[in-house]
Amino acid sequence: MAAKHYKNLIGGKWLAAGSRKTFENRNPADTSDIVGVFPASGKSDVDAAVAAAKEAFKIWRLVPAPKRAEILYRTGELLAQRKEQYAQEMTREMGKVLEETRGDVQEAIDTAYYMAGEGRRLFGQTTPSELPNKFAMSVRMPVGVCAMIAPWNFPMAIPSWKLFPALVAGNTCVIKPAEDTPLSTLNLVQTLMDAGLPKGVVNIVFGYGPDAGAPMVEHPDVRAVSFTGSSEVGRIVGQVAASHFKPCSLEMGGKNAMIVMEDANLDLAVEGALWGAFGTTGQRCTATSRILLHKKIARTFTERLVERDSKLRVGNGLPKGIQMGPQINPQQVETSARYVEIALAEGATLLTGGKRLRGKAHANGYFFAPTILADVKPAMRIAQEEVFGPVVSLLQFSNFDEAVEIANGISYGLSTSIYTRDVNKAYTAMRDLEAGITYVNAPTIGAEVHLPFGGVKQTGNGHREGGTGAMDFYTTWKSVYVDYSDRLQRAQID
Ligand code: UN1
């Protein structure tokens, strides 16, 4: 069967890249399966998309926010109708198991409903003026054309975190999906169009970062940039955006710790560890990649974890019963293998996994065995650097303070978790763990869309997605003063 060809969406028109160049999107569980062929766009395509967004902004910013919100609400309803189809297509291009891709679509539905509600809020402040017969208020204004660079691990949910708050606030958008997962982001944008979004309000440009992403960040008519991806690329995006004084939201890496105290419910902690470390094949920025074990329970926990790990069914994410899919591409598999080598050279012990799976069921895909490393010390590279694969490190501690110190002793600060039944320890951890997210008696993954999502230190640059955090990024404040005294009144003087 001939592969399906897709095009960019610019000003409501489906267009090939100006250069006619394309790239293939292949199924990571079976590389003989071509999901589609997409335009490999460049600067001229980005310029056209930004021009279309700039034109559409003239009209979209004046559509009342509750009406903009109705389109988001309809988008949520349509996504719910299409959930199964979109989830299947997402598993085919991204690899994670069907249950998880359904969750990814659901996250976009949740975001649609939450942000639709925002259309009737978008609250500002009214406040007294210091002068008589004068009125003062602040209102949220759209920023203008927003550029969005999306990752492949949540190819519908994360674009929805970016697009929906931007749209309800009255911005127009140019989005570049990750080159590994263009179809799911296209499905999201197609649904917005089917729900009645006017042409040019969202434009989609497919392609690679240096060719299509960079011109978006540099474009003078782009007023804000939102990026999710590696800290390495985020640093470049942030530097370029800063040189243009553009607001820029960066959502990057993690090295997320789960602390298991000696009083924890160990069965619960083992289940949480498996889900946190190997859900999405470990390819979440929130993935549990360090498990810190109190010395008293380390042995029992480790035995139970290894036992459960050995039973995980790894394969193509579509059939029922498979618990972990492939990695997204050969580079990610190589990264996992390289970090196992580094860890072993540093003195870690391989308890299970540690290699690419090459048996019959895995021959055509990028499968890496769920991997557990023990005897890991806090300063080792495997305990400091993000792998973004199914590789988890076990470390030990003797008391709570030491656990917090190890958890905080990294350059990242996204998610953390503690398993304990001691309410005092739980609250202390909530206060002292340096991270944007802390879970108590749950793994480091599983954020809900109506709370701020993001991290501290090298995970981010202070902005948040989700909830009101997103509204703060996609709006700018205007302060308005109305003087009805009919005379000149001078602030700070009269
Ligand atoms: C990510 O890890 O890249 O909190 C996003 C979670 C998901 C989103 C993760 N809702 O695990």
Image (cartoon, rainbow, N blue to C red):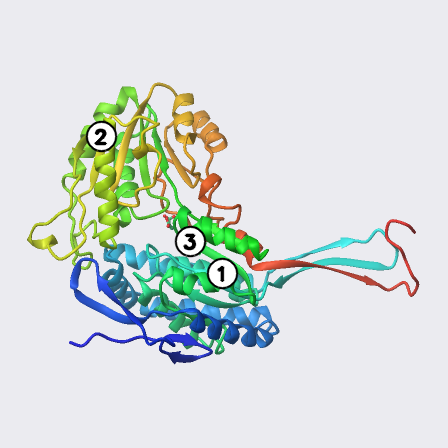
Residue depicted at 48% across the width and 49% down the height? 451
Label pair 3/2, CB-CB below 8 angstroms: no
Label 3 beta carbon within 8 A of ligand 1:
yes
Q: Secondary structure at mark 2?
A: helix
Q: Is residue 459 above or below residue 433?
A: below
Task: Evaluate whether residue 422 shows in this view.
Answer: no
User: Depth-wise, is mark 3 or mark 2 nearer the camera?
Assistant: 2
Q: Which residue is mark 3?
A: 228
User: Which labelled disc corresponds to residue 217?
Assistant: 1
Label pair 2/1, CB-CB below 8 angstroms: no
Cα distance in 3D space between marks 3 and 2 = 31 Å
Q: Quadrant of residue 473?
A: bottom right
User: Which labelled disc corresponds to residue 345?
Assistant: 2
Task: Evaluate whether residue 167 shows in this view.
Answer: yes
- Dot 1 surroundings within 10 Å: few (below 14), some, or many (20 or more)? many
Three-letter residue code for mark 3: Thr
Precedes in sequence: disc 2 or disc 1: 1
